[in-house]
Image (cartoon, rainbow, N blue to C red):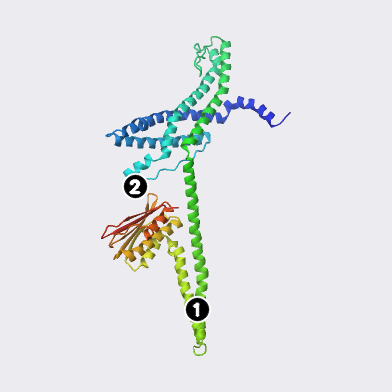
Amino acid sequence: MSGPHTARTALAPRTVLTAPFSRRAWREAAYCLLSFVPSLVGSTLIAVNVVALGCALTLTVFGAVPGLLFLVVGLALARALGALQRRLARGLLDEHVAEPPRPEAGRGLVDGVKARLRDVAAWRAAAYVLVKLPVATLGLWAVAWWVIGALHFIAPLRWAAGQEDLSLISPVPGLGMSPDSLGAAFVAAALGCVMLLIAPWLTRAFVAVDCRLMQALLAPGAVADRVRELEETRALAVDDAAERLRRLERDLHDGAQVRLAALAMSLDMVREQLDDRDRPELHSLVETARDNAAETLTELRDLSRGLHPPALDAGLPDALTTLAARTALPVDVLAFVPERPTPAIESLAYYCASELLANVIKHSGAGSCHIEASTGDGTLRLRVTDDGRGGAHIAEGGGLAGLVQRARTVDGEVTVRSPAGGPTTVQVRLPPHA
């Protein structure tokens, strides 16, 4: 009976015999050999920095600060070793392990240390480096099968060359041999051939264990994958919503507004041709219709401007300058945004500036206002300062609370500093993309 099973059975001996000559086997042996040294050094340093010094010193009163320093250095080293292992696996094994997200940089030394200590990916990398050492040691032992098997295989050649000492070690303790005749040398060669046939499968087994460890500890966890997926989905949804609003604004501007303007002009022409003495009631109806069309056109323009301000087409700095020029209060604008954020973030920043200016005019009693927009550290910062009476705070249902909710939709934040008597400073921090 012939079939696929018979073909696989016939192929198995060939696979076993040709395994030592395959490129995959040599790459796996090279990976085991190259990954041992960084694993040994890294596990020693991680054990000393993180486990021995870091965790131990933080439990003492006077060693807390040095302990935290050792922890931060050790975790950074663990991340670097994890990145090195991912590159080795990708280059030699074609094993692609996704890189976990980087921790958010803190705004100060304390926040930076907190961010490093809360970096789950760094702790998982440290666990991988510690667990990797025994696996790397076994991988090095598997590579020893290649070397010892090759020495056994050439034992007859060494005997024929007149080498007197043919003491041969074995990867298995207690099985070494010292051939004292040509026949014993050929026996050693046969044993070396068996070792060379076994070596590729040993290295493959330990490499498979290492790959599983990398996927479990060096790749982003399930929660991180889910968070990244949700962030990408949210970014697509926010950008799509911004594009739809922009398209709707253009449709209103080029369609409904143009038609309403034409209707108002037509009604003006009709009104001019009517005689008040002959048809006063008709004249009144046309006048009312014309006023309604004009009011509707004004409301539609305000609505479309709220959907997507046309000034944003030239960028956020120009849009803020235009907004300040339309404000009755003297407003000084300083904007430096060399790289444009996504349209959704630009619209949100413009909306925040518009709302804050409206609050300044309505509630602060200020005589002047200052708007500053800048980018840096992967953040778009918008700061609005006025010289009013102060006392502003985030109250439930208020305008500032609405800004906080809008900023949170893209992981932004709003901070308010407004002591009694002023000045008031509201800062909005937004990511460059949703």
- Residue at horizontal 59 percent and vertical 27 percent from the top: 19
Residue 107: image tag: 2
**Residue 88, position as x, y percentages in the image:** 48, 34
**Residue 90, position as x, y percentages in the image:** 50, 36
Element assignment for label 2: loop
| In the rendered image, the vertical position of residue 431 relative to residue 299, given as above or below | above
In-front residue for pair 321/231: 231
Q: Amino acid at mark 2?
A: Arg
Q: Quadrant of the N terminus?
A: top right
**Residue 152, position as x, y percentages in the image:** 54, 17
Mark 1 closeness class: few <14, some 14–19, many ≥20 residues within 10 Å: some
Going from N to C along the chain, the mark reached first, 2 or 1, is 2
**Residue 428, position as x, y percentages in the image:** 37, 55
- Label 2 or label 1, whichever lies nearer to me, is 1
In-front residue for pair 303/166: 303
Q: Amino acid at mark 1?
A: Ala
Apparent side of residue 282 relative to residue 425 in the rendered image (left or right)? right
Element assignment for label 1: helix
Mark-to-mark CA distance, 2 and 1: 59 Å
Apparent side of residue 335 relative to residue 272 in the rendered image (left or right)? left
What residue occupies the far right of the structure in this picture? 1
What residue is disc 1 on?
289
